[in-house]
Amino acid sequence: GMKAMHVRVYDSQRQTALAAASLFAAKILSKPDAVLGLATGSTPVDTYKLLIKWHKDGMLDFSRCRSFNLDEYVGLTPGHPCSYRRFMDEELFSHINMKETSVPLGSAPDLQAETQRYDAMIEQAGGIDIQLLGLGQNGHIGFNEPDRSFSYGTQVVTLTKNTIKANRRFFGSEEDVPRQAISLGIGGIMKARQIVLIAYGVSKAQAVREMVKGPVDPVCPASVLQLHHDAVILLDAQAASLL
Ligand code: F6R
């Protein structure tokens, strides 16, 4: 039979972030050279703040960890103010002591080669020990949008209208949001040894319901997590309101 997902509901975003940060801290304390899978967007920011605090308090040492981010916009150079590389530098990397951090290169001249290089790097690092995920309003994880099949390796994806709308807040206008991204595939996400997905707010409630209660179907990419042997879903009360 299907393995049950571990779903935990918290009263506040703060408590949810505390639970996520604690799982990452536990991993790093038990495996100081852990390979971390990281995400961007609004959701992980509180979690990163806690990890930064614990690092500054002397509790967490990232010096032997390395990280791989889920995705990057196609066409944006690492220095572009809206790139996910820039976001990660500002929200986490510049505040901690991790030496090796990887984000797909959205400005690579050969995107196909970049997707292969990225998967090879993850493999060489020994695979991802713990993967942080947010959830798209349409059920995407990474930038794996609703589809007819689950993707496997890192690939170039076309963003849906819904995702472009949801992410325009980070850009000047909707027209400025890139139409494509490089994203770890569903297979790449599923290979992570442990998965921690966070969702906040009522805008995610329907996607949360489909992810947890719906069939495993690429129409809701996150539903595949029902098949992962160690996936924890951390929700605030609003995101859990349709469960
Ligand atoms: C980000 C990512 C996306 C986001 C999702 C939710 O690296 O891969 O799947 O996690 O779009 O975004 P927020 O957190 O901004 O609601």
Image: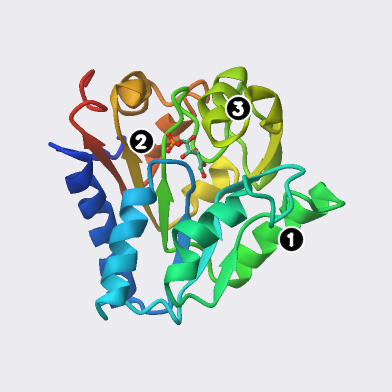
Query: Which residue is at the front of the view, 24 or 187?
Result: 24
Q: According to the image, label 2 marks what residue?
A: 226
Residue 97 rendering spot, x and y as whole percentages: 45, 77
**Residue drawn where x is 25% and y is 68% of the image:** 26
For this orientation, the residue located farthest to the front is 172
Is the residue under label 2 in contact with that under label 1 (CB below 8 Å)?
A: no
**Real-space CA distance between mark 1 and mark 3, rounded to the nearest whole angstrom:** 23 Å
Residue 8, picture quadrant: top left
Q: Left or right of 50: which side holds 99? A: right
- Residue 16 - label: none
Q: Residue furthest left?
A: 11
Per the image, the residue denoted by label 1 is 117
Crowding around mark 2 (Cα neighbors within 10 Å: few <14, some 14 to 19, many 20+) is: many
Residue 19: x and y in percent read: 21, 52
Image coords of residue 211 (percent x, y): 36, 27
The part of the image, by quadrant, that contains residue 91 is: bottom left
Q: Quadrant of residue 215?
A: top left
